Every structure is written in C-alpha cells, then in structure tokens.
Image: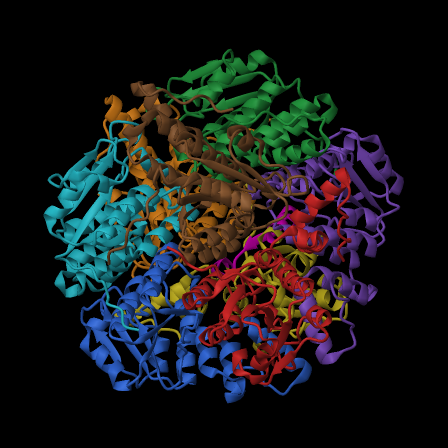
Chain colours: A purple, B red, C blue, D brown, E cyan, F orange, G yellow, H green
Amino acid sequence: MTKPYSRLDLDQAVVLLVDHQAGLLSLVRDVDPDRFKNNVLAVADLAAFFRLPTILTTSFEEGPNGPIMPELKAKFPDAPFIARPGQINAWDNPDFVAAIKATGRRQLIIAGVVTEVCVAFPALSAIAEGYEVFVVTDASGTFNEAVREAAWSRMTAAGAQLMNWFAVACELQRDWRRDVEGLATLVSDHIPDYRNLITSYTALRGGMPASRPAA
Amino acid sequence: MTKPYSRLDLDQAVVLLVDHQAGLLSLVRDVDPDRFKNNVLAVADLAAFFRLPTILTTSFEEGPNGPIMPELKAKFPDAPFIARPGQINAWDNPDFVAAIKATGRRQLIIAGVVTEVCVAFPALSAIAEGYEVFVVTDASGTFNEAVREAAWSRMTAAGAQLMNWFAVACELQRDWRRDVEGLATLVSDHIPDYRNLITSYTALRGGMPASRPAA
Amino acid sequence: MTKPYSRLDLDQAVVLLVDHQAGLLSLVRDVDPDRFKNNVLAVADLAAFFRLPTILTTSFEEGPNGPIMPELKAKFPDAPFIARPGQINAWDNPDFVAAIKATGRRQLIIAGVVTEVCVAFPALSAIAEGYEVFVVTDASGTFNEAVREAAWSRMTAAGAQLMNWFAVACELQRDWRRDVEGLATLVSDHIPDYRNLITSYTALRGGMPASRPAA
Amino acid sequence: MTKPYSRLDLDQAVVLLVDHQAGLLSLVRDVDPDRFKNNVLAVADLAAFFRLPTILTTSFEEGPNGPIMPELKAKFPDAPFIARPGQINAWDNPDFVAAIKATGRRQLIIAGVVTEVCVAFPALSAIAEGYEVFVVTDASGTFNEAVREAAWSRMTAAGAQLMNWFAVACELQRDWRRDVEGLATLVSDHIPDYRNLITSYTALRGGMPASRPAA
Amino acid sequence: MTKPYSRLDLDQAVVLLVDHQAGLLSLVRDVDPDRFKNNVLAVADLAAFFRLPTILTTSFEEGPNGPIMPELKAKFPDAPFIARPGQINAWDNPDFVAAIKATGRRQLIIAGVVTEVCVAFPALSAIAEGYEVFVVTDASGTFNEAVREAAWSRMTAAGAQLMNWFAVACELQRDWRRDVEGLATLVSDHIPDYRNLITSYTALRGGMPASRPAA
Amino acid sequence: MTKPYSRLDLDQAVVLLVDHQAGLLSLVRDVDPDRFKNNVLAVADLAAFFRLPTILTTSFEEGPNGPIMPELKAKFPDAPFIARPGQINAWDNPDFVAAIKATGRRQLIIAGVVTEVCVAFPALSAIAEGYEVFVVTDASGTFNEAVREAAWSRMTAAGAQLMNWFAVACELQRDWRRDVEGLATLVSDHIPDYRNLITSYTALRGGMPASRPAA
Amino acid sequence: MTKPYSRLDLDQAVVLLVDHQAGLLSLVRDVDPDRFKNNVLAVADLAAFFRLPTILTTSFEEGPNGPIMPELKAKFPDAPFIARPGQINAWDNPDFVAAIKATGRRQLIIAGVVTEVCVAFPALSAIAEGYEVFVVTDASGTFNEAVREAAWSRMTAAGAQLMNWFAVACELQRDWRRDVEGLATLVSDHIPDYRNLITSYTALRGGMPASRPAA
Amino acid sequence: MTKPYSRLDLDQAVVLLVDHQAGLLSLVRDVDPDRFKNNVLAVADLAAFFRLPTILTTSFEEGPNGPIMPELKAKFPDAPFIARPGQINAWDNPDFVAAIKATGRRQLIIAGVVTEVCVAFPALSAIAEGYEVFVVTDASGTFNEAVREAAWSRMTAAGAQLMNWFAVACELQRDWRRDVEGLATLVSDHIPDYRNLITSYTALRGGMPASRPAA
C-alpha cells in the first residue's frame, strides 16, 4: 500500500513555459480565454514569487505562431529563452535541455500550448530521462476537452503528475507562515473569489492589506 | 415592419453599477469568476473611456454583502456613490434616482449583482418612468443560468435591451476613427483573443502599439 | 417606451403550490434534486415569512403520484388543501378557484410539478381571467431543460412573469429594514453561499446572529 | 390569430456577409470552428446556387482584424466589396447601403462576425428603414452562448427572423424539383449526415450522383 | 392583462406528422435518439388514444430521405398519407391542406423532422391562414440546440405555441377520470419514471394494472 | 508491451442483473431515463440471444426500493432470482455466489443500480476471488456523472473492464455470420439509428427483414 | 487477475474533515452549492451514525478563510479539532497526525476543501506512510471540473480510492438489517429521491416511519 | 521514475482505417459531424503526407452499414482494402493481419467507427501480439461520451496510447524544417484556426503561401 509521495520541492523545481505564443493561443478552446490568460500569468507570478529558475521557449515566433505573450517576456527578462528553429518537441532542442540541466534540478513544472504536443512531448522525453514531471494543467491548453483528456491519459500513464497552478503554489509554499503576504497577493491577484474574501475580511478586521487593484 | 432603432448615444447614456460587492460576488455562478471580474472591469473602463456619467450604489456594505469592489471605487473617485440604507430596488432610493436625473440623460446602461434583483428591479422601475434601459448582461451575474434566463425574460418583456459590454462599447464608438488607440486599448485589456491579434499584428507590422502588459 | 412595472405587493399576493407530490417529484430532471427540494422549501418559508395566504393542491394523492411533500403539509396546517379528484388543470377545480377568490387577491405566485402542465395550465387560465401571474421558476420542475423552455415560452407569451424564489422574496421585502433578521434567516437557510457570508461576518463582527444549524 | 408569413423570396433576397475576417474569426467561440467554417462556406455556396446578389464588407482589413476569408473573395469575385474605413455598423457606410439599394431588393439575409455587433447593428438599422431581415444564425458567431442569446433577443425584439443556412436554402428552393441535383450537391457538401445518406443511397440504387469528394 | 387561453380541444385538434423518415432521422442531433424515437411514438399513441384525425406526409420517400418510420404507417393504416413529390413546405402541397380542411378542425398539432423546415414552414403558413398551431417540440428534431432555438423563436414570434407531447396529452385529457387506464397506459409506455411509479404502486396496493411489458 | 486480451467468451460468460428495481431507478440521473430503460432491456435481450446463464437479484423488494422491473422477470422466468434479505453487496449473499459458481463460468457481465454500490461492491469481491469482471456501463446507473466517474475509477483500478452493451454483444458475436438476423434484430430493437439504417436498406434492397415494429 | 478488495471496515475507519470553512467554500465551483452543503452534512451524519472517530481541522480560521461550518462543530463537540497555525498539508501538522494515530485505525475517510490541496496533500502523505485512503469525492470541492479531474488523477495514481458518501455508508453498513431505521434516516435526510420513495411507501404501507421533516 | 517514451516513428508506423462507412457514421454522436468528417479526412491526409502504409477495411459494405466514405477510397486507390465478410474484430480476419505484417512495421495508428468495437477489439488483439497501438481518438467515434470513456479506459488499461490526429502528425514530423509547406498545408486544411493564422500572416508578411481554398 505504501507509495512514496513525490512532492514538489523549492530546491528541485524548475518552471518550463512552452509556446505560449499569441498565434497558438487562438487554438486553445478547452478553457475560457479569460481564465486561461489568468492561469498562465499566475504560473509566471508563482515562478517569480518562489524564485524558481524559469525557462521560456517558443516555436517559429516569426511565423503564424506569433510572438510569445509579452507579459511572459517582461516577467523573466533574464531567463533562458530558447527560440526553437524547428523542433516541435522542445526536448529535441539541445539548448533547451542544456538550460534545464544547468539548473541541476530534477522536478519539471511544465505548462504550454498545445497540451498534447508542446507539453506532452517534452514531458514524455523528460520522464524517459528520469526527471519528475508536474504538468500545470490549467496553464496548458488545447483544441477541446476530448483532446485534453487523451493528452492527460498519455502523460499520466507515463508517470506525469497533473496539478493546477494553485496546487503547485500550495505544495511549494507548504506553510502560510513562510510568507503570508506573498501568497495572499498571489491568490488575490489570480483567484477572484479569494480576492473577494480578502476584501471583505480587510474591511471588517483590517491588518492584512488588500492587494493592489488589478489593471 | 419598421421599428425605430433605439441606439446608444454618447450624449444620452449614463452607467449604473449596482451592488458589485465582495460578498455578493460569491453568489454569482452563471459566469466563470475570471470572466466576470474581467467583464465588470471592462464596463468600468468603457465608462471612463467614453467619459460617461457613472453612478455607483451598494446595499448594506458594512454587513455580509461586503464592500464594493475596490477597483470600482478607485476608478470613479468622484462619481455619485449611493450606499443604500436598506432599499433593495435602487430605484426606491431617492438619492439614486436624483443622481440619474441630475445627468439629464435618458439611456441607462445598467449592470449589477444579482441580475434578477439588483438589475431587474431598477430596470423595470426605470422603464415605467420612460427611460431606455440597456442591460450589460455579461457584467451582471446571478445564481445559475436558469435564473438568468428568467430574469432576462422579465426584463425583455418590459422593453429592456440586452447587450454585452463589447456591444455597448462598439455602439458608442460608432467609428474606429473616433479614437483607434483608445478602443484598441479597451479591447486589448479585456478580450484576450483580441490582445493576441494585436500582439501578432504589432510584431509583424508595428505601428499600433501593443497595450501595456496586464497586471 | 413606458411600460407599467407589475410588481409583487404584500397585500395582493397569494401563493399556490401545485402537485409537489412524492411520486411526481421523481419526474423532475431539469433541476438537481438537492437544489429543487431546497427551492420548494424556500418558497414555503417565504410564504410563511411574509404571511401570504397559501393554497395547496394535489392530484390523485392516493395513487402513483404519491402524497404531498410532508414538509409542505406541516408548514401550512391550516391552509386550504384541495385534493383534486381528477382535474389536471387545478383551475378546472371550483374549490381551488374559490379558495383563491376568497383571498380577494389578484397576484398569483405559482410553483408546481410538472411545469408545463401543473403550473402552465392554471397560469394560462388565471391570466385569461385577469389575474397577474408570477411563476416561481426554480420551485417548478419538469422532465428536462427543453421541456422547461417550451413551457416558459408558452407562459411568457401569455403575460406570465418568470421569477426565482429569491427575486420573489426581495420584491416582497422591498427594504431590508422591514425585518432584517427575518430575511437574513430565510436566505441563510436556503442559499448556502449567503449562509457562508453571514457565518464569516458574524465571526468577525458579531451582532447579526448566525442562523440555526440546518437539519 | 392570423399573421402574415414573411417568407424568403428568390426575387427579393440579397445576401450580406459582414466581417468574416481571419483575425475576427478567432473571437468566435459559440460554435466549434470546423462547424462554423463549414456554415459560412455553405452560405456562400447557397448564395451562388440561388444566384442571389451578394455583398461583402470588412472592417479594417489591413489591421489586426485580418483579411476576409479567401474563399469568400474567390467565390464572389465580382460582388460589391466594401472595405469600411472605420464604421462599425456597416449601415453607417453609405457605399454599403447604396449597394443594397442598387439591388432593389427588400429581404436581407445577413451573417457576420461578431453577432451582436457586425450583424445586429446593421440588422437593427435595416429594420428601422423597413427592410425585412433574416439572420443566418449559424454563419454568425460571437464570444460565447450567453452573448449570442442576448444578441438574438435584441434582434428578434426588433422583428428580425432567425434562420440557419439550411432553412434559408429550403425556403428559397421551395420545391426539390426546381433543381434536385443542385440542392443535393449543396447539402451533400455541407451536411455530412446528408452526404452519408446520399452515399448509401447511391451505392444501392444509383441514379443520383454522389457529390464530388471534399477537399 | 387579460389574454384568452388558447387551449387544445378534443373536437378541434388534428395531428400532423411531417417527414419522420428513416434517412432524415439521422440528421436529428438535438435530442438523444432513444428519447426521440420514444417521443415520436408517444405522439402517435396519443393521437390514437384521443382518436384525433391524423395526417402523415413525407418528402421524397424513395430517395435518400428514406421511408417513413414503419411504426407510424402501422399505427395509422387508414390515415391520409401524402407523399409529397417535391414541395418542401407541406402547406404548398394542395392534398395536404385539403386533408386538413376535410377535418373541419382549426387546431393543428404538428411534429416533424427537421424542426426549422418541415415543422416551421407549414406552421407559419397555417398561422397565416388563421389556424392555431401547437408544435410538439419533443417529437420534432433538428441538427443541434442552437438551430432549434432559432426555429422556436421564429415560430413563437408568429404565434405558435410550444408544447411537449405530455402537455398535449394532459391538455386534451383535462380530467384523469375521463379514462384513467388509458392515460396511465400512455404515460407508462412512454415515461419510464412514471412506469416505475405505477410498478411500485401496483405492487403495494394493486388495483391499477401495470402496463404491458415493453417490447 | 504484450498484454493478454481478456475477451468475452460465449462459454465463460454469465450475466448478473443487480437491483434494477422500480424505486431505485428513480435515483439514476447520470443517464436519460429513456436511454437507460432501453439499455437495460438490451442487456436482457442480449443475454437471451446468446443464451447466457443469467442471475437476477434484488434488495428489499417489498420496501421503498420497489419491485424488479417487470420486463426482467418476464424475460427470465426460470433464472435464479435472489431476493437478498439485507446484504448490500450481493456477493455477501451465499445464494448469489452459489448461483454463479453453479454455472462454472469465470467471466461476469454485471449491470445494476446504483453503480458505485450494487455494481462496484460485487465486482470488487469477484475480482478478489479471481473472476474476470466486465461492467456494462450503460445498463448501470447512479446519481450523477461525477459519482459514476469515481465508481469507474475504483473498479478499473481493481482490474474490471468497462463495456457498453453493444460492445458486449459484438465481442460475444465475433462474426456477423454466426446469426445475422439475430444480431440485426438486437441492434434494430435497441439502437434507433441502426434501425433507421435497416429500414432504409430494406426499402431499397429488401432481403434483410426489418425488425418488428416497437411497442 | 486476483486483487484483494480493500474494503471499508467499521473498526478501522476514521473520518477526516479538512478545511470546510465558510470562506473557502466560496471557492468551490465543481459542485452546486445546495448539493455540496448537503453532501458535507451527510458525511458528518454518517460519521455519527457509524460512531466513527472523527477529526476536524482548519486552516487560518481567524483570517479570510473563515470559520468552520458551524454545523460540523456542533455535530462533533468532543472531536479533536486541530486549528492549524499555517501548515497547508494537514499531515505536516503533528497534532493532526497524532490524533489519527491515537485512534489506532488504518483506513482514512477524507473530505475537504479544496480537493487538490487540502484533500490531496494529506492523502498522498498518508499513503506514503502505509494508510489506506478513501476520498469522499462529493464532500470535497474545488474550482472547477478540470481541476477536480487532475486532483483525482494524482490521488488514484498513488492508490487512493474514490467514493461518494453513499458508497461509504453502504460499505460500512454492509447489511440493511444492521440498523434499518438508522440507514433509512440517513438516506432520507440527504437523498431527496430516496426520501420521496420512503414517503410514498409509508403512505401506502406504513411500518417504516418517514424521517422527520427537514429544516 | 524512468519510463521509455514510446514514440511514433516514420519507419515503424502503419495507418489502419476501420469501418468509416456511410451507414455506421450515423451512429457517431460523441463528436459533431462537421468536426468528425474533418478529422477523418485529416488522418487520411496525414497518412498520405507522411507516405505511411495505409490499410482500409470495412464490415458488410453491401448491407445497412453502407459503403466506405468515398474520399477514403479515392485517397488510397492502391492500399490494401479488406472488405470483411463477417468478422467484427478486424484482427480476426487473416487478410487484415497479413496486410499489416506485410509492412514489417510495429506501430499501429488506428481509427474507426465505432470506437469500443471496431477500434478497441483490434487494438486489444494487436497489443496481445506485441504491437504498439496508437488510437487516433478524434477520428474514431461512437454513440456518446460515456461510451467513449469506457472504451478509452479499456484500451489504455491494456497499454494503448491515445492521441488526436494533430499529435500524431507532430510526433511524426518532429521538426518543422522537415517540410514546412507540407505540414502547413495539412494544418491549414484541417484546423480552421490555424488557417486563419496563416491567412493573416501571409497577408502581412507574405512568403508562406496560403493553402488552396477549401472545397
């Protein structure tokens, strides 16, 4: 019955953001666009909040796939940015793998567009090389729900773990006391229901500052 | 066959934001919270962009209903703000009606929480007094889709017109040339798919500046 | 553009509960059973809270349709209870119509099972005789959503108004100050999200007593 | 009870295709993209089959909205093509209205992207000037189903008739004998289930040639 | 407020079954096929139970549209059967209209495939000639829900009433005592939940014979 | 990569129908009742067609759970019928297990109401004793889709195979030539779309008799 | 093929209720709130009915997360109640684990809010220490269905079993005769369809008392 | 943690198209027909583009199942075409297996109608003989989503990998530079959103020719 809990670790995790490009985003129809944009930005914010090494990659940016979401580039100005010249599976690009290896970390938190290709292919490759893979399901998107289910099935059969960004954040944080305001800001900025709770609480009790107004 | 087109007019429209309060927002389940928050902020931004007179009102802010969304208050620091002491139908509050009358305008653009009460009651009252009413459907929320349908049915039977915020913006703008950058910023900030189009376009052609990164 | 607002009035409204019987309830599949049971009990509670005259009626209780929900009978021990010997349209039963006429009221708040028959038939009959009809949509149920839509279409074309129980309660209450605790108890007992708001508020501020624990 | 049947007439109908542009199409999320593309091409094919005058218009083709679907331009090389310099409501563009008036026809068959703006605005304007308006609902698209419902509500309240392309084709055709092969080709090319019926029938009985293989 | 209740009358109603053909049925995707087949047979059974004059018509039976459902032909061996040589709108076929006129009745209960064509076209024609039209919504089918909604909108705007077969049966029956066993058999044969109620009731109390086992 | 194909075998399969009782059926809301009734009867027909040993069992028939569907009893008058006096897991009833053992077969085809209890419990027990278990998913029902998914997850983790009745029939039949008319009758009686295909085919070609009209 | 059936045992099971707090409940959107509240109270009632040791825990009750549902506290006044000072994973709190160990039991029945964090984290930790984990799926809630699916996937991959509260109750009860009235009360109080069956049965046969009226 | 990545290989893959017949296609209701037709043609196009050996098979073409989609036959005039005389599982047909063996390949890409029979049976047989099986989920169809889920569960438990056609294409292509125009044509012809991206890109930048207009 015993099975070890493969748990995200602040010292082992690296974030991979794959092909969140303006053109490819128009293919994503298994998530509402407002929610999807919010989720992707939440992953970026959590990577920054937890100071995780983060690697960006794109496919054919100068073609119809379009440029990377400008917010991602702005958020990680110094992160490795691998503009792949043609490889569909990012793992086939030596620079991408080298950037991961340079971190010395073994837990890959991966999100991308589209799920069954840009996420699943490197996920399967990484598992084959002994990495632990955590797919950020809600910051990865694809054509429709049935495609998503098939992609999830293929990845979980290989041992990938499926997590939404909120679970990733909570598993990394472990204890609210590590940085209450930091985590509160993250959830307030990206979970409207949580923001409302904080707004009401602050009005009544004060003490925990309401997050800054959203743009 | 002829029926006059009752069309929004920059000189006749006033925006009414009713009970977008942190507590009441947790009742809204006919729209995804990410999308709903975005839509409400879009209405606020369009009211500001078109310099429409805007009136805020709340119900029992100091109780469980909670405070108004801070972003709304921040956006309209000088707008009439009617904190109703108990009236459920805002139209039963004389200050609210007086604030509308003070604008001298006859077209009410109304959004609120929850749709069948905080929007429908004043909408029906206003129609009875000869106002034209335009309900911003996607910035109004309620318990579930069936409740929404019933609320829409009651309001349309009385003559209210149902519009999403994008239609409101377009009907007021009339011509892109009126202010191309202004409208582009509005849609880029609140329609992720449009933002992506602009991002790709700008990368290829330049000329129309991409909107600022979102928060 | 002017259209009079036909508004529920505490002195004109009467509540009609039609055929909420244990057997017939198994036919209802356009609403989740937990939600439906809650909505029907909410209508009963609001009728009691506002002291509205209430009339119960059933069809063939001793047959497969089954007995009325025991909670309704327990709630209104002295209300007129018309066990119809065979008429499908309750309005075809003279005792039912007589009970309504005895109240001297002109606004009928009606809910029942199934919507397109037990609600729609008496609603159409009542409108033909000059009554105002308000259908409590969420305390009325039927086979599926498409049947519901057709039933709503037929009733609204005849002039019936569609309202959920919460809108009915709010339109009758008009002002929270009329009886804050009474309305708070009603919504706390039947809207879990509202109950949560009150629970949190009470814990922080106190003053408004949390409703009693549910059964 | 009598109400005249406002019926599409081969001699009165004109087809208006509004803003089916490559960029704007990425905003359409109330219909699956495969189905939507098929429906738009079906309208184009029916316009050609019935030799209806057809008018194309676009908004800001050279900007992010993108060029018109190339198939539409290829289908109607000689049709009036009004590239609007800025007017959002095509009816505000004098060339567009002039092109309609030049046909001398009074029945407008209109489809476009997005429904609540590019379709609804000219529809309401045309009705106000006494035209009959028939909205091709399934060749018009928008952000989501709730936006579509609001747009349909606004247009039907003004007197527009909602029809899918198949109903339009059948109402124009009136009798299969008018051109059996023509109509069979149209439905075989755009309704896969119908194509299958024809394939099976042809294999068994022969006589009615199966349509050409799709691309 | 008064509006006459246009109510189905055993002496005025005639049933029109339009194009329920084996081929065309494969186009129906707004209802589950098990439910749809059951609903169509229920309409046939109710027509027989209430001894309503019934008229069958088909379009191109010998082509891909396929033959009428054999159960319908078997149920009404002596009913007028108009195999239309090409008219899409059955009302354009003089024999069809003559068969209706021969009944001397003014209330048309109509069902067919597909809703927006085979039902809507004759419905609109009949209303224009002063008939009352009752559409059996759940025994009429079409491509998808959005097409259905548009078709319903067009018909209700013209004055058609939307009813499911159960409402039709109940409005015609008026009183269970008219023929308890007859109506119980009808609902037991076509509403599984009702059949279960009767099965349980009969086992406990006896007296009302359970309907015969289904095929 | 090799994994043996555990395939249904006419000589090893036995059918278990668990608690398809009139009362319990009202709990089933993850399938439409028309479809569910049809599926259960299809399993009964396939058991008879393939002459598989079949075992019926019920729980508390004389109480609120109600009697077994009369059609099942009528179909298998001589089958073992175990009315369990109280055991919820049928496998806890020695007579039930003895009836299975008496067949000498090792493949259990099981369907029942509700899925997570009446199907899952004996399925898990049987697997623990070395039987192969095939769950007829579409003839098993429960409260809602989420409950179904959890039940399926628990059973598949233990090694149960999920199959709809059509797959069961096809895997047992193996070759249409084994009995073309028999399988055609089965699918014609329980798959309306297949019936339509046969109706159209027969009308055009003849030779394969259309199934008898449904009740 | 043999796999042991890991079955809930009255002497081994302990119930863990994690973070059912008034604020956090507003985050739950994968279940209707009426149903969710009912399910959580059902788990509480079943824990009491089966006299299972029960442990409550909360996260930051005095902050925006809000207090525990008052009904839970009232139901288990003497249960261990661990108000965690900051640990997100309850298993990281030594008092929580100590309370479990103090029971000497090895089967954990766990429910909580939100599923992927407050349920999944301790579930994975407990499995790693050799406990059997049974997740009460319908008394655990989260942001949306896709998040739920990912959370279920992660837990089942580790060996957790997914069960709704009704399956838990039935697996613990094993035989209706253990306490017929007790189980009947539980299901009557929390499954409206079952309550209806009992109401009808009691009216016809008597003997099994109908449960008390709900609040 | 390491698990080998079983990856599609241009030299090992063979495409099996099973029973895409005009009659059987009317059974498919888990995918919209427009999308399904498109997906099947996309698989055909990708097989041709990658020059993969392709094998066609049908069941009872001359009966109600109907002829193979004419487009498939036209696309692969020289491919092995096995018209099975009766075997339901194509793997039971020696010619079919021989055709596969003749290719010398070990990776089977399989699509068909219906999923749980025509795809699952040969998939399970092939896995038992040591082949790698890749199911093209979106070019395989069946009665409804629940049937599909059960079929997927059975196949994945045996080791089949689920992929949509786009993932298949991308995994075979590996690098855009292998043939940019070829892959661009494939996605432009079968993914309308991708076509739109290419249309817009081409208009702005030129260089990559837009695909030919669709039929």
A117, above or below D118, in the image: above
Where on the picture, by quarter, is residue C30?
Answer: bottom left
Magenta region, main secondary structure: helix
Q: Is E127 in front, or is H191?
A: E127
Q: Residue at x 64, y 62 (%)?
A: B37
- Left or right: where H44 falls relative to F107: right
Where on the picture, by quarter, is residue D128?
Answer: bottom left
Quarter of the C terminus of chain A within the rendering: bottom right
Q: Is F53 in front, or is E154?
A: E154
Count of all numbered marks drawn on residues in the image: 0
Residue E33 in picture, x, y percent from top left: 35, 42
C83, above or below C77, in the image: above
Q: What are the residue bounds of the magenta stretch?
A: G148-171
D159, above or below C121, in the image: above
Where on the picture, by quarter, is residue G55?
Answer: bottom right
F34 in the magenta segment: no
Q: Is residue A89 visible?
A: yes
Residue H47 in picture, x, y percent from top left: 58, 21
Q: Residue at x 17, y 43 (%)?
A: E97
Residue H26 in picture, x, y percent from top left: 39, 33
Q: Is residue H124 visible?
A: no
- Left or right: where C126 falls relative to B145: left
Residue C178 in picture, x, y percent from top left: 50, 88
Q: Is D150 in front, or is G123?
A: D150
E129, above or below B26, in the image: above
Q: Is D32 in front, or is F116?
A: D32
